[in-house]
Amino acid sequence: MNFKNNTIKYKNIIVFASIVFLTTHLQAKSERYFKAFNTSFSLEDSTSAIQRTITGTVTDNEGVLLPGASVQVAGTSKGVTTDFDGNFSIEADTGDVLEISYVGFKSTRLTIEAQSQYTIQLEANTSELDEVLVVGYGTQKKSDLTGAVSSVVAEEFNKGVVNNPGNLLQGKVSGLNVTNTSGEPGAGQDIIIRGVGTLRSGTSPLYVVDGFVLDNSSNGVPTNPLNFINTQDIQSINVLKDASAAAIYGSRAANGVVVITTKRGKEGRTQMNFNASTAISSLANKMDVFSADEFRSVVQQIGGSLSDNGANTDWQDELTRTAITNNINFSMSGGTATTSYFASLGVDDQEGILNNSELKRYSARANVTQKGLDDRLKIDFNLTATRTENTRPNTNTMVSNMLSLNPTTPAYTNGEPTVFGSGVNPLIIQDIYGDYTNNNRMIANISPSLEFIEGLTYKLNLGVDYSKTDRDVQYIPYSEDPDLLLGSINSVFTTNKNTLVENTLTYQKDFGDHGLTILAGHSYQKFFIHEKGYYFSDFPDNGIEPRYQLGQARGEDNTQYSNATSNELQSFFGRVNYDYANKYLVTATLRSDGSTKFGANNRYATFPSLALGWNIFKEDFMADSGFNNLKLRASWGKSGNQEIPSKQTRLSYGESFADDDIYPLNEDVVNRDDYNYGLVFARTANPDLQWEETIQTNIGLDFGFLDYKLSGSVDYFLKETNDVLLYFSTQDPIDEVGFKWQNIPDMKIKNSGVELALDYQSDRMRDFSFNIGGNISYIKNEITDSPFTIVTTGTASGAGQTGATINGYMNKQPIGNFFLREFTGIDEDGFSTYTDVNGDGQIDDNDRISAGSAVPDLLYAFYLKFKYKNFDLGLNFNGVSGNKIYNHTRMNLFNKTQISNSLNTTDQAIEFANEDPSNSNTVSTRYLESGAFLRLNNATLAYSLNPEAIGMDKWLDNVRLSVTGQNLFVITDYTGFDPELNTGSSSDSKSYGIDYFTYPKARTVVFGLNVSF
């Protein structure tokens, strides 16, 4: 199915190209004409204009001096900032206009007259409600919002080594749970807004960058696909949490929407910023495995077979390192009344704490805004280009070895890695194994808008997101081990293209006390993914890496493959915002989406929402209440989810040969490969497959008083997902496929909860000021009316355990529920005992219990900020509670069998003195631990240096020195490296809370320099 209307699309391009050309041409002609006119007739003015030095002082309305206030000659690039006594000096002419601005105060303008000395008072801008937030397809004043929207600006972002927007937000937004799956540089993330609302892997919110809607699918990068965004380019991030705020994005808004706005230039002199930092990272938490002496003692104590090789090796030290991260970023911005720009270049070079682990990013951005036709025409252009280079170790092997290798075995012999009698020294593996990924990505969009008549604006948004990724995973031939003798390489090339065409009409008008904004639009988006790859083996051991000599591969199992998917999404949407006297607010949204991912019978779905708001503090009876803000919000809406694999509704065939369905029609044929084979169903058609829908209700209250010193919000929400999509058995003997994607009748996923956010800001004008605040969220999650006993998500790996269920989805239980045998101890014979739940005298899978969920029900965070003169200190804490973690690493390694076989472990292995070394490590609650924690996420101490103090005030505006600590401490009962993780195995369903040889987290100290000039 093709939604595209080429005629409309190309007409749009031609029309706006013509408008841009004519506007630029006419503007250039008019500027030349008036320049010539002024040259001919204004000679007297130009000769009489004499610049002189204007001095002054900037204070607040109580006379408190304001250092760092901006003083600029309007329409020029000339500007200064006030010194630490609030004084300024600038060259200006009589008649020039000075623009004076300062954060937290209303800007003012001053016309230069005969005098040369001025005292300027700025009025505090106490109305936070005038703040404008970017929402779907437009902006709204904070006072006009009826939905649940949380906004985080650049000054509030988490500091330190931060690779992607998720890390900027961790702990900053109520109801938002950000979990880094491991400690790897740029690791993947689980980002969940208001609870998990789907059973599949597509739980991430929708990301919108400068109006361009990103594709949530993978682009071939094994780490986080959002690492391409230079976080220093981001101005603000708005999280649209309820259906009223998110429903304008309809089909992909069920998991919430994250709207990212990058920095833009503004009228005035060119401003340049240079940022440089160096970070030092080390292993935050070493596992307490036995030292060499302890190892020798314990092995003998339990009667094990001691292999003493005479050394004293700490394998955690050998396989980790002190990692260095360097970051350099330069940006410049400025503009005139008609043109503004922002441009940046950035380089990030981050080492991981495991050897051969590195993430490099080279980024460039250009944002340009051009105005014309008396500001009725506006063109926004955004371009970002990024190259990401990712090198990864074999994490599972490396972590397993650092915890289990015999500590009496020397790491090196005669200066070279020791060659083991059996197995391979991980110091050798790190030399012969390589996982290299290179990604080039470009996102560009242009958004011209034209106000045809007063209040009526048409906007076109054209954009493309183009990404190419190549990944090589190789083993260099190693003659000492038969499994690695031949060498191999697996290479994958991925191309992603996401194109977007949007047309919107917006009408905005005030009629006395009535305010009306109407939005209508059409969106067409196409996604194309092409992947091809090959596997080659049997390379000569000639010192050349396999990736550089593909033609030398001689393996008999060499293979190649390729595939492609193409999906389209067409949408029609509208929104009406109405307010009466700025007191009573109504927002109504309707969006209809059609997706080629769904069957012909259910291709389109409609997603409505309605929200009401009441600005109570503007009522007459609240005049003397002391409230600066008190608003009641209520909303209801429906959103959708289409994140399933492509082509699932279409008929597909495969070759019967793959399943040994062959036809020995010729009795002389004795070789299986020569038998005839036919076609079988690989997938049956499913035209009735339809959207997964989420209905959400929200009631919220925003408040602020004491001149906004104390502000906050509280929300209650109820979110319910219907028509749940899942890949499961058809239970139909006629259906030859057996498994396919289906909507599960009557099954529901329910999330309900309460969110609270508070912030207190003291008087910023004093030498000492402070800011304290935080948020807390309680979320209850439950699956109801499920027809399944359990849908397995996380499974075990390892000898005798592979495929055993660890957690999954169960009726009347939360998502990520652990379904395990209940461990009760060790019997007199030395073997594990478990609860006989059904009392049948047998211990089997029928005796498993619901043992808790991997998803926390309590999220909280708080921050403390202190400022004294030029010093400032910020502390950010975050934590979770109510969740469990399955310590799969402990199950595999920390047992008596390990130590008896002369492999290292921890004292957990000898917890039970009478345990038999042959006792099996069965999946059970024995390895289930609390995942609750409180973390000091980051702490920053900074000093703003006065450029005048070092004689650089003519060239520099500001110099800021800082030191930041990340992951400084964690309070937790979890015995693994870190409780924030998720490295469990999963396929079409999402797994949670399994620690399987997870890349450990680092503790980092960052030294930073920021210079503005």
Image: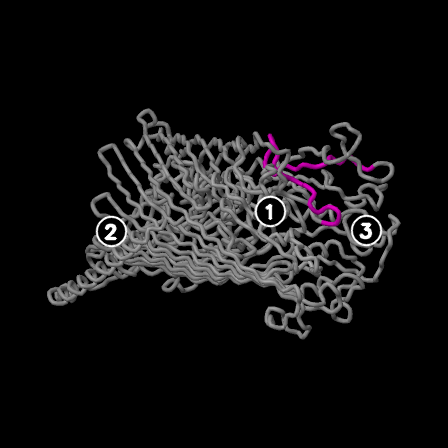
Residue type (three-letter) at the residue carrying disc 1: Ser
Whether residue 783 sits left or right of residue 426 in the image: it is: left
For the residues labelled 1 and 2, the Cα–Cα distance comes to 65 Å
Give the residue pinned by disc 2.
110
Does residue 858 lie above or below 226 as drawn?
Answer: above
From the viewer's perspective, is 514 left or right of 225? Answer: left
* Front residue (pair 519, 907): 519
Report x, y in % for residue 980: 61, 46
Residue 201 can be seen in this image: yes
Which residue, as the protein is rendered here, is positioned at the far top?
A: 621
Which residue occupies the extreme left position in the image?
A: 41
Image: 968 above or below 628: below
Q: Which mark is residue 899?
A: 3
Q: Quadrant of the C terminus?
A: bottom left
Quarter of the view holding residue 391: bottom right
Residue 702: image quadrant is top left
State the separation of the CA atoms marked 1 and 3.
33 Å
Q: Which residues are magenta?
A: 798-826
Which residue occupies the foreground of this view, 168 or 843? 843
Mark 1 against mark 2, which lies toward the viewer? 1
Residue 987, disc:
1
Which one is closest to the eye, mark 1 or mark 3? 1
